[in-house]
Amino acid sequence: MNKLKVTGVLACIVLLVSHLSHASSILSGDDGYRLWLKYDYISHLEQRASYSQQLSHWHVAGNSSTDKVIRQELTYAFSSMLGNQAVDSQQGDASLLVANLAELPEALRNNATDGKEFKTDEDYLIYGFSENGQKKVLITGKTDVATLYGTYHLLRLVQTRQSIVSLNIFSSPKISVRVLNHWDNLDRHVERGYAGQSIWDWHKLPELIYQRYHDYARANASVGINGTVLNNVNADPLILTPQYLEKVKALAEVFRSYGMKVYLSVKFSSPQLIGGLETSDPTKPEVLAWWKQKSKEIYAEIPDFGGFLVKANSEGQPGPGDFGRTHAQGANMLAEALAPHGGIVMWRAFVYANEKNEERSKQAYSEFKPLDGKFLPNVLVQVKNGPIDFQPREPISPLFGATPNTPLMMEFQITQEYLGFSTHNVYLGPMYKEVLSTDTYAKGKGSTVAKVVDGSLFQNNISGMAGVSNIGSDRNWTGNVLLQSNWYAFGRLAWDHELSSEEIAQEWTQMTLTQNTQAVDKIVNLLMSSRETTVNYMTPLGLHHIMDEGHHYGPGPWIKDLGREDWTSVYYHKADEQGIGFDRSPSGVNAVAQYHEPLRSRLADPSTTPEEFLLWFHHLPWDYSIKSSGRSLWNELVHRYYQGASEVEEMAKQWSELQPWIDPLLFAQQTMVFNIHQQEAKWWRDACVSYFQSFAKRPLPDGLTPPAHPLDYYQNMKFPNAPGRGD
Ligand code: GCV
């Protein structure tokens, strides 16, 4: 064989091998389906022995369908983590006892509950005690669902290798309604969904119940999520027809055992669209009668139905405004229909209309503030965290703290509509925490958003938090395993907003990815900085809504001339030769007036506005001096774009070093995601820097590599088939 031929053969082999290394057929392993409930075998001998000793005999006292779920979970978890060393046994012999408070022997109940007040049916207690010289653990609460939550807590302790000796953990949810919002259409398209199709196979329901429905409910229960809104807020009225209610009922029956209620998004004009009425005016008796009858029909089939979520008079959806009525009149009519059955209305405050001729960030406040106190007790007004729309960073919505007599429910987005879809690795725990810990000053210092939302600030008797789901039919549920952490973090924070995003990241990592402490630290660091990194390469210094039009995939700061001014990017950044930013101060649209003092004055002045919100509230000259760095605004903007993109490279590098500790399949998949993430962060950087440079007309700071292509290259990129589009 001559040299040329040898080189040729070698090249073929190299090509084949590199091709194979991307072929899934040679890799088997963790595909992410098991989420954080993997229960991997505890390979450390001493650890396993110590847990086995403590958990060797367990007993679940009750016999409800939830108790059966607990039994199944313990059987599965212990056989998986400990080998078949733990057995379901008699109550007297059990070292782990799961039992309802009411059924406990009096002495044990008194000792265990000493000084603890069980305020809700979901509160649980995990209590370690000794009996006849044997160490035991009790999980108890007023209901079987409470003990299910306690069981998941105990399993989490084992999964994160914590001690389960002498436990005395009492936990009570800080928020009562903790729900996912699925923006899933009945044809299985998920609006703003980036993980495949809807997990609800409406066509095959009610007969076909996928195991996935159970696993979905298990995952939710394990983090304390107690409800799900099955369908898109841009609602199809058909959901309320008998044909679909039968399917809803089938799902409700699965979820009930896991403590999850089912809710539905409803179209306000349903009485006309499916009820044959001539109007949907909430003041007309026949309209109320229709909703009452519909509610009766639903509760006859689903006695624990949660209630309705409504998007009204927003982005083309019908609402009470169509009949000259207020949001309160619309919400109250539905609330009246649901009240006899114990249902609630979650009425969204995401409204903005052309006719009002008011700046978009101000409209929700203007419309809802005057309605404070006008809603019935079973109505929650659901408010997005920021005043515009789930941007990588927004100031808080000024509605938080503005309605002392109306409970406000938080709406977070878990799916990444404006955060790079499912190929950008962004852990949202820090963002949720940033919002929740922001001070509204509504009742003086310390009036945090969390206290508004959990009802403690204004003593509301109902509280709620919703997360727009990132779940789809993808085998790994969320399109990218790292993004499972956002579903997880949402649930954990909805239960207890005082947890830190770091501890949540840590427990999620240990349960999902690896037990190696060094690797866990690395991953937690990577997760913790990921959101700030994303803000840097997408929307630094308070820029917002500069994504490409419609689908919101990729950069589009040049977008203009759409049906509405406030759908364009140029409306939001207002870049010109003088400077950049939206003047929402008193010299501009005065959106700051909607906040309480001292926030209002702080945000009114660029020198006291936090830098992360500078261009949200102010239009500033390109040479404005940035306090923290001494750079000019132009140089700072460019610096942050470059910093963000290089941080993603660093994240990818960190990830590549984790190979020894991560399942090979999961590692390979995630590595490919990181490759996309790196490319897209650079794309964001280059497109935005080129575009803004065309106004700033200033050079890039020394030492930076200029964008790879001219501006029109980025402007001409088109993605007509980007996933998750709204209709
Ligand atoms: C479900 C944004 C999204 C829409 C979404 C809307 C809403 O505008 O782009 O897809 O509609 O918010 O929250 O209602």
Image (cartoon, rainbow, N blue to C red):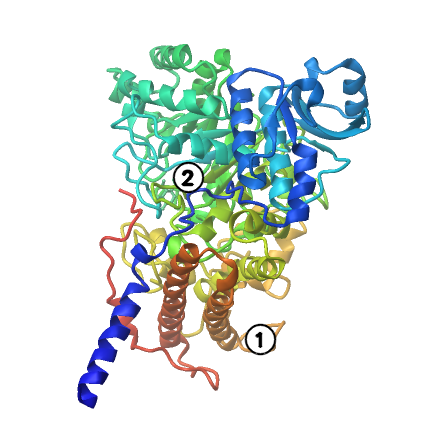
Q: Which of marks 2 and 1 is nearer the N terminus?
A: 2
Residue at the image point whose x is 49% and y is 22% from the top: 257
Identify residue type, mark 2.
Val
Q: Residues within 10 Å of mark 2 (few under 14, many from 20)?
A: many
Residue 393 visible in the picture: yes
Residue at the image point whose x is 45% and y is 30% from the top: 228
Q: How crowded is mark 1: few (under 14 residues within 10 Å), some or many (20 or more)?
A: some
Q: Residue 625 carries which label?
A: 1
| Residue position for label 2 | 351
Residue 322 relative to residue 700: left or right = left
Q: Is mark 2 on a helix, strand or loop?
A: loop
Identify residue type, mark 1.
Ser
The one nearer the camera, 609 or 177, is: 177
The one nearer the camera, 526 or 2, is: 2
Give the distance between the C-alpha atoms of the residues marked 2 and 1, in whole angstroms. Answer: 36 Å
Rendered location of residue 275, percent (x, y): 27, 16
Rendered location of residue 242, percent (x, y): 29, 16
Q: Is residue 458 above or below residue 580?
A: above
Rendered location of residue 245, percent (x, y): 33, 19
